[in-house]
Amino acid sequence: MKVGVCIKRVPGTDSRINIGDAAQGPDLADVSWEVNPYDSFAIEAALQLQEAGTATDVVVFTVCGAEGDAKIRDALAMGKKGTSGASKAVRLDDAAFAGSDSLGIARILAAAMKKEGVDIILAGKQSIDGDSAQVPAMMAEVLGWPSVCEVTDLEIEGGAVKAWRQAGGGKREVVSLSTPCVITADKGLNTPRYPTLPGIMMAKRKPIEVVDAAGLGLDASTVGAAASSVSVTKWSPPAARPPGRILEGEAADVVSELITLLRDEAKVL
Amino acid sequence: MGTGILVVCEHENGTPKKTAYELLSKARGLAQELGGTVNAVVIGSSNAADLGEYGAETVYTADGGDFTSGSSGAWVAALQGAVAASNPAVVLGAASAKTREVFPRLAARLGAGMASDCTDLSVDGGALIARRPMYAGKAFADLKITSDVALCTVRPNSFPGAAPCGGSAVVTDLGVTLSEADLAAKVIAVEEPKSETIDLTEAGRIVSGGRPVDSSDNFDQIIRPLGAALGATVGASRAAVDAGYAPHNEQVGQTGKVVNPSLYIACAISGAIQHLAGMRTSRVIVAINKNPEAPIFQHATYGIVGDIFEICPLLTEEAKRQGIGA
């Protein structure tokens, strides 16, 4: 079974995002990049399938320019002694891809997955920059494959897949499906491993294939800015909160003052 | 180009969720500016007619068998049917576990643009503008969607104060027939939670604990009783979850749940940027922290500089005495 894993590089969770210009969006020149944390769960799940003998090959996919190569190497470096981890990465890069909306990105990835002949696609439930959580399920729809999103437990035997997902209110849905399919990972699915030194050395020699629209056999008019139906008209920073108040005094007094304020002033109790 | 608004109404055992009423009330206002009517679609067995009181003119339903089980492919097929039947300009749903799986597939099937997890919807020059947080709320983007139909999911509690308008709805069964492909991913069981809890993302009140709570026992003895006394759902910081003091599904923050309650009480949470990202839109924030320099105080509506092991039990007692959570 060949596993395709979608990854994206994103600003780290400790990054400050500054909006310099309402038309331009955030200035990301100084942020430190990391592999999207939810994608790390997807990579880990793929490597566990490899180590269990279920997955014969793991390939990492990303839509990005060459600036993404460092983070691709991070993903390729996961894996441990005796197992190789992901064998290669496919970086989907074409000027025609610029300005794609989620559906455009889904079409690019779907074409790449089809070309590579993967049997199952694992992805993070969302990337923590755009936070849209749209691309994986859209990709499944473009491929005509079933999908399960936000999975916290996964069993794969042969082509049979059983996935558990939070359904709200503490309930968990158990979903049955078969490959080919798309699964998105939530926190709790596993604990991603740290790359080892041999893994990092190995990753340097692994190929990163760069593929463009023509290489995918993709009609470039179905992706990119011209095909996008979603555009940002304005960026803004979060609304500033009015200054708060520190309550001072004996603990018992402060506590009853707080309850009174929450009930009578803020009216939230 | 469609007209009017189709609201996807979720329900719990047949009773429409609060989010359904919030969205219908908001849709009524939007429809006055955008034109067209407000209609609703409900999947699974529910009191569909009630939605008329909140402004739905027609309620489309798909019920029984695989619609009731909640398989996402069945939802997509039913919503596709409802879009075909009502030809809306906008489809609205609450941002929920179900819509996060269903809406993107529906968007791809319809070739439609989508805005996820919006916190505001407005009309500018006759076009819908969807405001949504990105980078976990560190930035907001106003989106314009130019496809024939626009799909938006809305973060719960974004439009409080839903009000009935005294209408009544025509209930129409969609008569959707499901194909094998629609049921390729099938919900075969739903595991019930050990205790009745409100989803963090929908909770109106949240009490969260940080790493200094120091053990899962202390979570049970300090944080959870306070939550119960205030009628609040319990959350936790990433550090507390990673230390094993609270389960993953209680994590609030950029890599956990993004919440939007009217009251958020942060107990021994310093206010790391990735935690703030998950709760900064809370209407009222209370911070309880030993360290007066903790960044959380800059975001708090009310702050108490003190030890949670002293303050929280007192707060629990006082809330109980006043019957707050009852």
Image (cartoon, coloured by chain):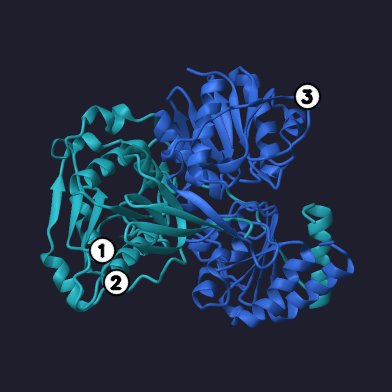
Please provide percent x and percent y for residue B20. Answer: 67, 39
Q: Tell me the CA gap for discs 2 and 3.
A: 59 Å
Q: Chain A is drawn in which colour?
A: cyan
Circle 2 SS class: loop
Check disc 2 and report the residue beneath it. Answer: A52
Q: Which of B310 and A199 is in front in this view?
A: A199
- Amino acid at circle 2: Ala
Q: In which quarter of the image is residue B285?
A: bottom right
- Using the rendered image, report if marks 3 and 1 lie on a common chain: no
Task: Identify which residue is drawn at 64% across, 53% down.
Answer: B282
- Using the rendered image, report if marks 2 and 3 lie on a common chain: no
Label 3 near label 2: C-beta < 8 Å? Answer: no
- Amino acid at circle 3: Gly
Circle 3 SS class: loop
Q: Residues within 10 Å of mark 1 (few under 14, many from 20)?
A: some
Check disc 3 and report the residue beneath it. Answer: B167
A195 vs B198, left or right, is left
Q: Tell me the CA gap for discs 3 and 1.
A: 56 Å
The chain identifier of the residue carrying mark 2 reads A
B90 vs A191, left or right, is right
- Amino acid at circle 1: Ala
Res. A36 in view:
yes
